[in-house]
């Protein structure tokens, strides 16, 4: 039998749902502050208790215009909107929200917006993987499958579906971080102007992600990474030399970020290029230098392996990159040290020279 509970002046019927060895509570609004009316409406809820416990979502006469008990089928489109609204209220970053929307839109394109979310099972997930493998890379599919697992877990925890579909992730060989040796870095820098050379050098020395210098704040000798826009959702500090500080000021004065979350910091939208311009310039320079396979993010990987070669301290690398766990950083300690010494001869000289300030030339090693 359903229980009764009054919350903020309104009555709810309480149905206890079996979930494994535990019971979860499903609250059905009775839309009244009158206890006598609430008890009458609870009688109608009791008549449907078995259906409710079986996972059937019902709308009662006081909850719909028809005045009838009817089955509610939550569509995929409505479930996506509900999830998005809830996660944004929790502070999910714009980039993470965008990744989820790309994944959910792709699923809606395949199944249809009105597909009942409760009917999505392993058959539909297998169909998605089969159809999309011709269109997307394994890594893209993997990211979307992870988003689906989180999405369906959210719906299950809130009683919208009975169970999470079985979603088996793809078996993808672990990819090692790709770094740029001194020679590769210099050859790529030779393809761009002096300003872009300084930009590339800044990212290689600091290990920043693409938007972090633009969305961060310069305080004294430190770049403070904004936790609201950081991938790890954590703030961390990066020490800057005088040369790096000068480049940061130059970057922030000429670049904006359309994804910047509004904070108490003044963030003018400048009339110059957006942060993505850096990665586009890097891609073109790589092609002009007749290289392939490198991405702008590999400047961050390069910073990590160089820092590890200099310090032989994986925790120092973790701190520099702002990782939440050293497990995320350990991959940078897997390279053969003698190979790194050949690729970065400037870091193993007995009298190690300070990296030159790249006013015109950033050649090293």
Image (spheres, rainbow, N blue to C red):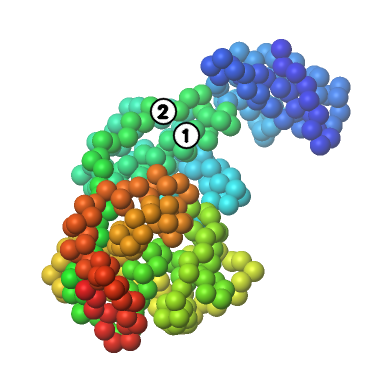
Mark 2 is surrounded, within 10 Å at the Cα level, by few (under 14), some (14 to 19) or many (20 or more) other residues, namely many
How far apart marks 1 and 2 lie (CA) works out to 7 Å
Residue drawn where x is 53% and y is 16% of the image: 20
Task: Give the mark, 1 or 2, whose residue is nearer the N terminus.
Answer: 1
Identify the mark at residue 165; answer none if there is no mark: 2
The C terminus appears in which quarter of the rendering?
bottom left
Say left or right for 77 vs 157. left
User: Are the residues tagged 1 and 2 within 8 Å (C-beta)?
Assistant: yes
Residue drawn where x is 69% and y is 32% of the image: 63
Identify the mark at residue 7; answer none if there is no mark: none
Element under disc 2: loop
Mark 1 is surrounded, within 10 Å at the Cα level, by few (under 14), some (14 to 19) or many (20 or more) other residues, namely many
Q: Position of residue 155 (x, y in %)?
A: 53, 33
133 shown above or below 179: above
Which of the 4 quarters of the picture holds residue 121? top left
Q: Position of residue 168 (x, y in %)?
A: 33, 31
260 shown above or below 47: below
168 shown above or below 179: above
Element under disc 1: helix
Q: Residue furthest bottom?
A: 360
Residue drawn where x is 38% and y is 54% of the image: 313
Q: Nearer the viewer, residue 280 or 248?
A: 248
Q: Nearer the viewer, residue 75 or 67?
A: 75
Say left or right for 75 vs 192. right
Q: Residue furthest left?
A: 290
Say left or right for 360 vs 184. right
Residue drawn where x is 42% and y is 42% of the image: 147
Q: Position of residue 88 (x, y in %)?
A: 57, 51
The answer to whether one can see residue 14 in this image is yes
Q: Nearer the viewer, residue 147 or 312?
A: 312
Identify the mark at residue 152; answer none if there is no mark: 1
The answer to whether one can see residue 300 in this image is no
């Amino acid at each position: 039998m359903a229980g009764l509970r009054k919350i903020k002046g309104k009555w709810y019927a309480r149905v206890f749902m079996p979930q494994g060895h535990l019971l979860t509570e499903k609250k059905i609004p009775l839309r009244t502050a009158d206890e006598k009316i609430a008890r009458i409406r609870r009688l109608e809820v009791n008549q449907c208790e078995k259906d409710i416990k079986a996972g059937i979502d019902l709308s009662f006469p006081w909850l719909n215009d028809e005045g009838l008990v009817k089955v509610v089928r939550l569509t995929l489109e409505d479930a996506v909107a509900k999830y998005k609204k809830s996660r944004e209220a929790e502070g999910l970053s714009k980039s993470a929200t965008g990744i989820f929307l790309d994944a959910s839109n792709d699923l809606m394109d395949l199944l249809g917006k009105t597909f009942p979310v409760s009917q999505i099972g392993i058959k539909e997930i297998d169909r998605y993987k089969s159809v999309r493998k011709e269109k997307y890379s394994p890594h893209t599919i993997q990211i979307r499958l992870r988003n689906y697992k989180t999405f369906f877990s959210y719906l299950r925890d809130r009683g919208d579906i009975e169970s999470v579909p079985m979603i088996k992730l793809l078996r993808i060989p672990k990819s090692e971080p790709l770094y740029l040796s001194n020679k590769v870095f210099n050859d790529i820098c030779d393809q761009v102007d002096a300003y872009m050379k300084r930009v590339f050098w800044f990212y290689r020395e600091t290990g920043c992600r693409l938007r972090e210098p633009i969305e961060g704040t310069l305080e004294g000798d430190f770049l403070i990474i904004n936790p609201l826009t950081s991938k790890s959702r954590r703030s961390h500090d990066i020490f800057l030399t005088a040369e790096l500080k000068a480049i940061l000021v130059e970057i922030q004065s000429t670049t904006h970020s359309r994804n910047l979350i509004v904070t108490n910091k003044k963030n003018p939208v400048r009339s110059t290029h957006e942060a993505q311009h850096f990665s586009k310039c890097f891609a073109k320079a790589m092609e002009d230098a007749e290289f392939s396979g490198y991405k702008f993010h590999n400047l961050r990987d390069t910073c990590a392996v160089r820092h590890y070669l200099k310090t032989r301290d994986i925790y120092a690398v973790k701190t520099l990159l702002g990782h939440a766990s050293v497990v995320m950083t350990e991959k940078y300690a897997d390279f053969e040290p003698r190979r790194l010494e050949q690729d970065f001869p400037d870091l193993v000289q007995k009298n190690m020279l300070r990296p030159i300030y790249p006013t015109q030339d950033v050649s090293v090693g």
